[in-house]
Amino acid sequence: MRLSKLADYATVLMCRMAARPELTYSASQLAGEAGLPPPTVAKLMKLLARAGLLTSLRGGRGGYLLARGPEAISLADVIRAVDGPPGLIECSIHPGRCSLEGGCGIRANWGVVNAAVIQALRDVSLEQMNGGPAAMAGLRRLRD
Amino acid sequence: MRLSKLADYATVLMCRMAARPELTYSASQLAGEAGLPPPTVAKLMKLLARAGLLTSLRGGRGGYLLARGPEAISLADVIRAVDGPPGLIECSIHPGRCSLEGGCGIRANWGVVNAAVIQALRDVSLEQMNGGPAAMAGLRRLRD
DNA sequence: CGCATATGAGACCGAATCGGTCCTGTATAG
DNA sequence: CTATACAGGACCGATTCGGTCTCATATGCG
Ligand code: SF4
Ligand code: SF4
């Protein structure tokens, strides 16, 4: 039920970049600032770039910059880039891989729960994550 | 981000029992009905019983029965019994174990997201999972 | 009483995943 | 031409996961 440590780190890095969206960041520089091992950060940046969340600039003075505005990148985007498609249950991602699928009476309803959770992650942007508690007001509504 | 297969199976078993809450079920019988390996089911039942979700009756003619009504057991309860406390991020469960905790600017907001997801799981009961799509109406509200 | 049944507790193991590192190639600035 | 910095991917140790097995204990029944 926990998301991977890498995906968590990715959100930290992305939010750090989102604070100054117009700057370009090199992997090693970002690693230093965040207190993470440079090779790990480099790997994450590559994943995020391949997913289209970051634009890469090669060569000297190169680095990464956000491909879209911080309000247009969601937690779900970051998680998907690192861990693959999010989803609580197997059958929502790899249909046919669960042996119970035929006689599983709760698959449909699990799907509803699953979709709700994913939607919640899709509804939170990097901009909101960087903002104060007030920026999360929309999410608090989920708890009513 | 995915929950463990065992936890998923546990929800299937619990919902099956919730269909006839007054009956007692033996592990082997339930395994046969659900199409799961008996030893695995036995292990799950033990975990669920230890967590207080099932009452165990030992001896001949024994078995397990729901400790509470199906409307009073949530998905979060089942997941916690099998996988431990649910939660997306490390610092929400094992405070102090994440090296970034000091300078992590998004920890607070991650906590809000985390709480919202957990609350969603707490709001769905076995009874709702067994019901038709209409029973999940409350959850659909999360997607607005 | 004695046996069959059923759970309780926990050790155990192979396989898969995860976290993390490293190496090689390529593109660009200066 | 050289230093910088990303792209791709191989690689490995450690951990977790899924699953099985054994032994002990408690109860119902003949
Ligand atoms: S079919 Fe049922 S048991 Fe299998 S993954 Fe989907 S919800 Fe879980
Ligand atoms: S402190 Fe920040 S990086 Fe560490 S687990 Fe919490 S949210 Fe993730």
Image (cartoon, coloured by chain):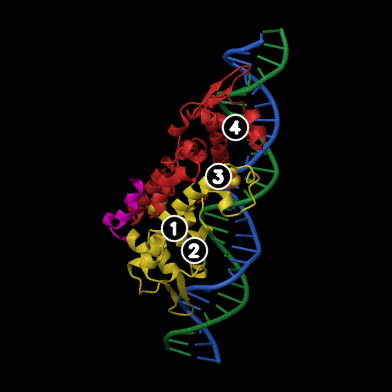
Chain colours: A red, B yellow, C blue, D green
Chain letter of disc 2 in the image: B
Quarter of the rendered structure image containing ligand 2: top right
Find numbered disc 2 in the image and state the secondary structure of the residue it sits on.
helix
**Secondary structure beneath label 1:** helix
Mark 3 crowd level (few <14, some 14–19, many ≥20, 10 Å Cα) = some
For the C terminus of chain B, the image quarter is: top left
Percent x, y of residue A42: 61, 30
- Residue B98: x and y in percent read 63, 47
Circle 1 is placed at which residue position?
Answer: B9
Of the residues under marks 1 and 2, which one precedes in the sequence? 1
Q: Are marks 3 and 2 in contact (CB under 8 Å)?
A: no
In the rendered image, residue B139 lying in the magenta stretch gets the answer: yes
Tags 3 and 2 on a common chain: no
Asked if badges 4 and 1 are on one and the same chain, I answer: no
How dense is the environment of label 2, judged by Cα within 10 Å: few (below 14), some, or many (20 and up)?
Answer: many
- What is the three-letter code of the residue carrying label 2? Leu
